[in-house]
């Protein structure tokens, strides 16, 4: 008989993560508008303030992994989410560049800890035989939040102003915190490791994280630059593109978890790689708005398979007590790829048409495919067998 997946704790952590991501994505497009329009901060200083968040998140990830593995991870999550919720309430009280930079840096640090905590808690609260399905459902919260968050934030800002926008986001985050208490997991005996730089990363997670690094450069090029690309091509349906992209992300994650749990990791990743290898050039060479939307759907399905499958594999690869470091290793590669990819593509876009850049990401996907087939998957398969956790 199949073990029960849904429980009060599992439903609570998924719901809390959805609301946490909702607040995050609601602030993402509205904060630059608030800084430049309401506070009259220059574009250069605004860029610096926004960058503080990513810098802090990247710096804190390895330390977050250590905290999650060496202390009660539920308490780490609750404390960081509480502080992050409080930060949303401080935004409208701050108006200087330095103060806003420091606040954004603190916010990035708390986000780095919160977002590193949730996946290990999910993995701890699902049956070991259904970890892929559980991680797939958990991962659904991202495309949902990515779709409704910006619409919610921009709508409140336009109709009711910045103060009500911050208050609404604060309310969403506070609701996330309240629901999170229902995800409280029983305390486990922790064998605390001595703090050392070598304990901040997990070597077993490195091959799969390297695969994702190259894939996330391609993913980030869509999320960050597709609006600029659409303007260059004269496509007016950017909002529809993101809806199609997010819908494909959502739909792809409905079925992949069960396939993962049946042992089809290799096949899932290959399908995702093939779809993105087709989708990125299709996006770069789109001649009309219909082709533009089709490319969004293809890439949405591809990345919708690849992201949660890699994260589920990393959680399946290591012992429960090591999931914090493993997830942090994965998320560092995620953040570094988005940051470095943004800088690289931003630099190249002054010299090369964005459509050509999208087409050239095909080679990054081929590189990731080679790493996965010849290194990451054999490493994964060997370690899972050695640990006798094939169905874990």
Image (cartoon, rainbow, N blue to C red):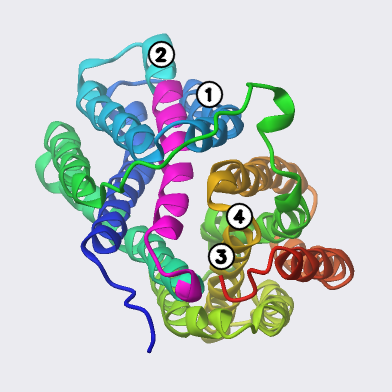
Residue corresponding to mark 1: 48
Q: Residue visible at 59% across and 53% down?
A: 319
Closer to the chain start, of discs 2 and 3, is: 2
Closer to the chain start, of discs 3 and 4, is: 4
Q: In this view of the protein, which residue sits in the foreground, 159 or 242? A: 242
Query: Spatial distance from mark 4 to mark 2, Cα to Cα?
Result: 27 Å
Quadrant (top left, top right, bottom left, bottom right) of the N terminus:
bottom left
Residues at circles 2 and 1 in contact by the CB criterion of under 8 Å: yes
Residue 376 spot, x, y in % from top left? 80, 64
Residue corresponding to mark 4: 220
Q: Residue visible at 76% across and 63% down?
A: 383
Mark 3 or 1, which is nearer the eye? 3
Mainly helix, strand or loop, the magenta region?
Answer: helix
Disc 1 crowd, CA 10 A, few/some/many (<14, 14-19, 20+): some
Depicted 184 relative to depicted 38: above or below = below
Residue 259 seen in the figure: yes
Going by the image, does 307 lie left or right of 370?
left
Disc 3 crowd, CA 10 A, few/some/many (<14, 14-19, 20+): many
Query: Spatial distance from mark 3 to mark 1, Cα to Cα?
Result: 34 Å
Closer to the chain start, of discs 2 and 1, is: 1
Closer to the chain start, of discs 4 and 2, is: 2
Query: Spatial distance from mark 2 to mark 3, Cα to Cα?
Result: 40 Å
Disc 2 crowd, CA 10 A, few/some/many (<14, 14-19, 20+): some
Residue corresponding to mark 3: 312
């Amino acid at each position: 008989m199949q073990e029960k997946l849904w429980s009060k704790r599992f439903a609570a952590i998924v719901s809390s993560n959805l609301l946490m991501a909702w607040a995050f994505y609601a602030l993402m497009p509205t904060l630059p508008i608030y800084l430049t329009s309401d506070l009259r901060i220059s574009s250069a200083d605004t860029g610096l303030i926004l960058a503080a968040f990513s810098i802090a998140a990247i710096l804190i990830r390895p330390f977050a992994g250590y905290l999650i593995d060496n202390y009660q991870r539920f308490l780490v999550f609750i404390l960081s989410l509480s502080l992050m919720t409080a930060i949303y309430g401080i935004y409208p009280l701050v108006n200087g560049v330095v103060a806003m930079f420091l606040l954004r840096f603190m916010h990035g640090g708390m986000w780095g800890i919160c977002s590193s905590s949730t996946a290990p808690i999910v993995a701890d609260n699902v049956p070991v035989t259904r970890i892929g399905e559980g991680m797939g459902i958990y991962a659904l919260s991202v495309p949902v939040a990515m779709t409704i968050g910006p619409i919610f934030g921009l709508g409140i800002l336009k109709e009711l102003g910045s103060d009500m926008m911050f208050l609404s986001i604060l309310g969403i985050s506070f609701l996330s915190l309240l629901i999170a208490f229902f995800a409280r997991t029983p305390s486990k005996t922790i064998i605390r490791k001595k703090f050392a730089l070598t304990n901040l990363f997990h070597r077993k997670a490195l091959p799969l994280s390297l695969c994702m690094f190259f894939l996330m450069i391609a993913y980030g090029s869509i999320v960050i630059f597709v609006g600029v690309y659409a303007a260059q091509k004269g496509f007016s349906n950017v909002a529809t593109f993101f809806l199609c992209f997010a819908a494909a992300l959502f739909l792809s994650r409905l079925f992949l978890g069960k396939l993962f749990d049946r042992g089809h990791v290799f096949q899932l990743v290959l399908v995702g790689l093939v779809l993105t290898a087709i989708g990125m050039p299709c996006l770069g060479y789109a001649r009309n708005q219909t082709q533009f939307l089709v490319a969004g759907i293809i890439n949405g399905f591809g990345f919708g398979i690849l992201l949660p499958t890699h994260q589920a594999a990393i959680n399946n690869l290591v012992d429960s007590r090591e999931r914090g470091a493993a997830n942090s290793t994965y998320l560092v590669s995620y953040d570094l790829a988005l940051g470095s990819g943004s800088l690289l593509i931003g630099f190249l876009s002054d010299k090369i048409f964005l459509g050509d850049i999208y087409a050239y990401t095909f080679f990054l996907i081929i590189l990731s495919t080679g790493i996965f087939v010849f290194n990451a998957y054999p490493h994964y398969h060997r370690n899972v067998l050695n640990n006798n956790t094939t169905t874990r």
